[in-house]
Image: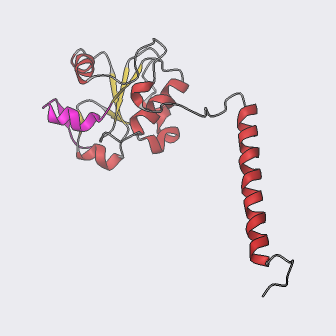
Amino acid sequence: MTQRGKTSPWREAMGQGVVLVAAACVLAAVSNGLRSDGIPWVGDWSAASGTTEDGLALEISLEEAQILFFTKEAVFLDARSPDAYARGHIEGARNLPWVFFEERAPTVLADISKETPIVTYCDGEGCALSTELAVALMARGYDRVRVLANGWSVWVENGLPTASGP
């Protein structure tokens, strides 16, 4: 029960909660704005929206990927889990799961020069692992990285060379 002219404890707590959330949002926005590497407010985060250091679209077509594969110009990196990789992968591809990037990158990338073309892929149109892997590689200085969207499915559907096992 409330007395006339007094706010209930529940209503007072809700008001304080709203004020705390609003203050946290303002503090986060100010902090993000002051950082040199702040997160943009608006952006297209799809693979197709990005570009490489050479100005190429981050996403590569199946036709371009086939040329790089058959001429052996590029290294293909599978961003999927080790289990998915073992069940099947693009022939000659190396497994560098995004979730184990920091742990496995030094070994997997040891003999790949920064100038070598790299094609990352995962599976499914909504799979962002290959894009995340590509961005991480570019941050490490690999400037010729491309993403084959829906890579595994598209590769298999087109009857291109595959392998299985670890």
Determine whether 32 is above or below 144 in the image. below
Q: Specify the farthest residue to the right.
A: 5
> Of residues 56 and 76, which is closer to you in this image?
56
The residue sitting at 22% across, 31% down in the picture is 91
Note whether residue 96 is visible: no
Q: Specify the farthest residue to the top.
A: 54
The residue sitting at 23% across, 47% down in the picture is 87
Q: Position of residue 141 (x, y in %)?
A: 53, 20
Render colour scheme: secondary structure
Magenta run includes residue 152:
yes
The residue sitting at 17% across, 30% down in the picture is 161
Q: Specify the farthest residue to the front.
A: 4
Relative horizontal placement of residue 81, taking residue 67 as reference (left or right): right
Relative horizontal placement of residue 37, taking residue 93 as reference (left or right): right
Image quadrant where one finds the N terminus? bottom right
Relative horizontal placement of residue 17, taking residue 102 as reference (left or right): right
> Of residues 72 and 10, which is closer to you in this image?
10
Magenta span of residues? 149-166
> Of residues 21 and 148, which is closer to you in this image?
21
Quarter-wise, where is residue 78 in the image? top left
Quarter-wise, where is residue 159 in the image? top left
Q: Position of residue 12 (x, y in %)?
A: 79, 71
Q: Position of residue 43 (x, y in %)?
A: 53, 31
Note whether residue 77 is visible: yes
> Of residues 56 and 22, which is closer to you in this image?
22
Determine whether 33 is above or below 103 in the image. above
Image quadrant where one finds the C terminus? top left
In this rendering, the count of numbered labels is: 0
Magenta run includes residue 95:
no
Determine whether 89 is above or below 110 in the image. below
Determine whether 144 is above or below 45 in the image. above
